[in-house]
Image: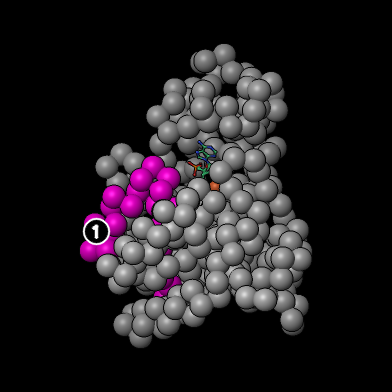
Amino acid sequence: MTPFIDLHIHTNCSDGIHTPEEVLERVREKKLTAFAITDHDTLDGYLGVQALLLENDPRLISGVELSVSFENQDLHLLGYLFDHTNSALNNALKEMQRRRSLRGQQMVEKLNRMNVGITIEDVRAVSGQAPVGRPHVAEVIFNSGFTNTYEEAFEKYIGDGKPAFVPKVNFSPAEAIMLIHKAGGVAVLAHPAINETYRHIEMLTGLELDGIEAFHPAHKQWHIDTFKHMAEQYRLIVTGGSDFHGREGRYGDIGSQHVPEKYLVLLQSRAQQRKANA
Ligand code: AMP
Ligand code: FE
Ligand code: FE
Ligand code: ZN
């Protein structure tokens, strides 16, 4: 059997619903050879899984998903194979967590003005210790009966540009890529088909982006082919994963993207080069 990997997985330490323990159990069931936990703006899920690893477990790669702002749009950058103790990175994540908490409150206020009666305490009850994300808010809106589905909460209220949406104050692409590089890691553009963020590939490559996520549940076969081609053109590595959140929506199940293991080898050699040049 071809060995597969999954380099895009969320836990309930950000906006997934499964604990690090449950995620690890599912990775084992799927017989992946390697995986990365890529929670939004926190390393807690990665550290949680790391603490649970047994000798013959699949290989765990350090990961994180950062949001950056460019031309009033959010781009998601995945960081891999960095030193998780790096203090600049950890401080930056703390700052983003603080901003997320504030922004969560602002979205609740906007929702209240639209007669969606939810509270920040309701959101906190869902997010727990995790940095507050829109999926937590969407879950509360849906569970409180203000929409018929979870997805509808995005469509009506908090999706990009919708009336109760509040943009996060994000790092610039240059800042985020530099943070990852200085921590010895590689930076990859996540799910470039969503909001067509691949349009910014040239700008990002100019900032020394390392890779592009080609395999993702939101990508059709022609996207995968296009992004592999872009990778060749711009000398980028190719990555992929399920973006597992354990929620409905545009995510897949762990292992669902059948990402061949060879891409991990290329990722590792790119990280070696980065570390050599750091
Ligand atoms: P945030 O980082 O708080 O802005 O939330 C972004 C996250 O919300 C993404 O990573 C997805 O998990 C989720 N999300 C954003 N837009 C949608 C949507 N239209 N449908 C489902 N999930 C979405
Ligand atoms: Fe998410
Ligand atoms: Fe994302
Ligand atoms: Zn993600």
Which residue appears at 56% of the width and 54% of the height? 243
Which residue appears at 70% of the width and 28% of the height? 143
In the image, residue 104 lies at what x, y percent? 53, 35
Q: Specify the farthest residue to the bottom.
A: 276
Q: Which residues are magenta?
A: 184-208
Q: Name the residue nearer the viewer: 177 or 190.
A: 190
In the image, residue 258 lies at what x, y percent? 59, 64
Question: Looking at the picture, does residue 11 appear above or below residue 270?
Answer: above
Task: Judge whether residue 201 is colored magenta.
Answer: yes
Question: Looking at the picture, does residue 38 appear above or below residue 170?
Answer: below
Q: Name the residue nearer the viewer: 73 or 192.
A: 192
Asked if residue 196 lies left or right of residue 101, the reply is left
Asked if residue 94 lies left or right of residue 178, the reply is right
Q: Is residue 220 visible?
A: yes
Question: Looking at the picture, does residue 252 appear above or below residue 268?
Answer: above
Which residue appears at 75% of the width and 58% of the height? 22
SS class, disc 1: helix
In the image, residue 6 lies at what x, y percent? 59, 65
Q: Quadrant of the N terminus?
A: bottom right
User: What colour scheme does the image use?
Assistant: one colour
Which residue is tagged 1?
A: 202
Q: Name the residue nearer the viewer: 188 or 131.
A: 188
In the image, residue 136 lies at what x, y percent? 61, 38
Q: Quadrant of the C terminus?
A: bottom left
Amino acid bearing label 1: Glu
Which residue appears at 41% of the width and 53% of the height? 223
Task: Judge whether residue 114 is colored magenta.
Answer: no
Q: Residues within 10 Å of mark 1 (few under 14, many from 20)?
A: few
